[in-house]
Amino acid sequence: MRAAVCRRYGPPDVVEIVEIPKPTPADDEVLVKVCATTVTSGDWRLRTASVPPGFGIVVRLAFGIFKPRKAVLGTELAGEVEAVGTAVNGFKVGDKVFAFCGLSLGCHAEYRSIREDAAIALMPSNLTFEEAAPLSFGGTTALYFLRDQARVRPGERVLINGAPGGVGSAAVQLARHFGAEVTGVCSAANAQMVRSLGANDVVDYAREDFTQTGKTFDVILDTVGNCSFATCRTALAPEGRLLLVVASLGQTISARVRPSRSGRKVLAGVARGRAEDLRLLAELAESGAFKPVIDGTYPLDRIVDAHAHVETHHKKGNVVVSLR
Ligand SMILES: NC(=O)c1ccc[n+]([C@@H]2O[C@H](COP(=O)([O-])OP(=O)(O)OC[C@H]3O[C@@H](n4cnc5c(N)ncnc54)[C@H](OP(=O)(O)O)[C@@H]3O)[C@@H](O)[C@H]2O)c1
């Protein structure tokens, strides 16, 4: 089968399309013929070994000291079940599914085998493969931080820093779904797009610093990496929660050992994808409450261009790779 492999850390053109063996599903696995996948900020991090301060050595130990240990990147996919292992009960040949493989990677290939009890679910009936592939990276991250960590309640004021991105565009929609009043921080060029996702207000970061407006928020979710408790303190309401989607090692440890400061909380961590979350995201997609934003779709042969676009850090939502 064809796959995009990354055999050394480096710029987008370290990625090449090669033939590798097609996987054979184990007894408890389904073999998915991948119809669409995405290149995410996570793939950029793993291709370049660029991580927030303090995590460098941790990531190299986990993912490869000198080169990526898992050469096939790709955290999420949508496709069709081509074969099932003998012990699989929940899926059958022909099912249209989407899956979040997260840091197990391996989605930038024509086939991926996945355990049936992993983060895999039936696709929402109203989305194409290209629309379903990007459901999980941003969606599960937004659920983890907004629902599980901050426990956002109806009527709360939620600010999303980096609102147009893969995580931000999902967070705006899901915060609105939870009944929050949402402010999105983005460039002027993306203000209309962020409003169309449901944001009640937008802040253009080139003209205004959201921490200096005098407004306060119950929840601030930072996907950019330029927030800290010190900079956001005055913008956090009493009992406000600062969610650091991008956090240095120091911030992550500090959030664990000293989460609460003057009634306000700092929360950091790594989102986990679970099948039940994927099923919820599929339901929300079917009801129209959540639809992944797609910046562009590239054929597998042009995955290097997709990586280059992701590396600008100004993509709108998601960059999709179609294998159909
Ligand atoms: N902790 C976790 O579990 C977890 C999970 C997923 C992702 N992440 C991390 O989350 C980060 C964001 O991921 P992503 O996929 O959403 O990235 P992305 O799609 O590249 O989005 C970044 C967004 O930030 C906006 N932006 C750039 N500079 C800004 C600034 N100064 N102020 C406000 N907004 C700004 C951009 O919008 P404009 O074009 O309008 O500037 C862009 O849309 C990545 O670092 C990723 O590694 C963490």
Image (cartoon, rainbow, N blue to C red):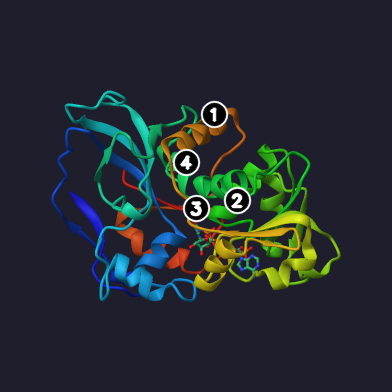
70 relative to 206, above or below: above
Q: Which residue is mark 3?
A: 318
Circle 3 residues within 10 Å: few <14, some 14–19, many ≥20? many
Q: Considering the numbered disc 3 on the image, is that residue within a helix, a strand or a loop?
A: strand
Give the mark nearer the N terminus: 2 vs 4. 4
Q: Is residue 205 visible?
A: no
First in sequence: mark 3 vs mark 4: 4
Residue type at mark 3: give it: Asn
In the image, what residue type sits under mark 1?
Answer: Glu
Circle 4 residues within 10 Å: few <14, some 14–19, many ≥20: many
Q: Which mark is residue 169?
A: 2
| Residue 95 picture location, percent across and down | 32, 27
Q: Is residue 94 above or below residue 2?
A: above
Q: Position of residue 224 (x, y in %)?
A: 59, 66
From the viewer's perspective, is 161 left or right of 81? right
Nearest to N terminus: mark 4 or mark 1: 4
Q: In which quadrant will I find the C terminus?
A: top left
Cα distance in 3D space between marks 4 and 1: 12 Å
Q: CA distance from mark 2 to mark 4?
A: 14 Å
Q: Is residue 178 above or below residue 234?
A: above
Give residue 131's mark: 4
**How many angstroms separate mark 3 from mark 1 (CA)?**
19 Å
Q: Is mark 2 within 8 Å of ligand 1?
A: yes
Residue placed at 66% from the left, 51% from the top? Answer: 193
Q: CA distance from mark 3 to mark 4?
A: 10 Å
Q: CA distance from mark 1 to mark 2?
A: 17 Å
Decide if residue 93 is on the left or right side of residue 98. left
In terms of image quadrants, where is residue 298?
bottom left
Q: Residue at x 24, y 65 (%)?
A: 69
Q: Distance of mark 3 from mark 2, alpha carbons?
A: 9 Å
Residue in the foreground of this view, choosing between 11 and 59: 59
Disc 4 on helix, strand or loop? Answer: helix
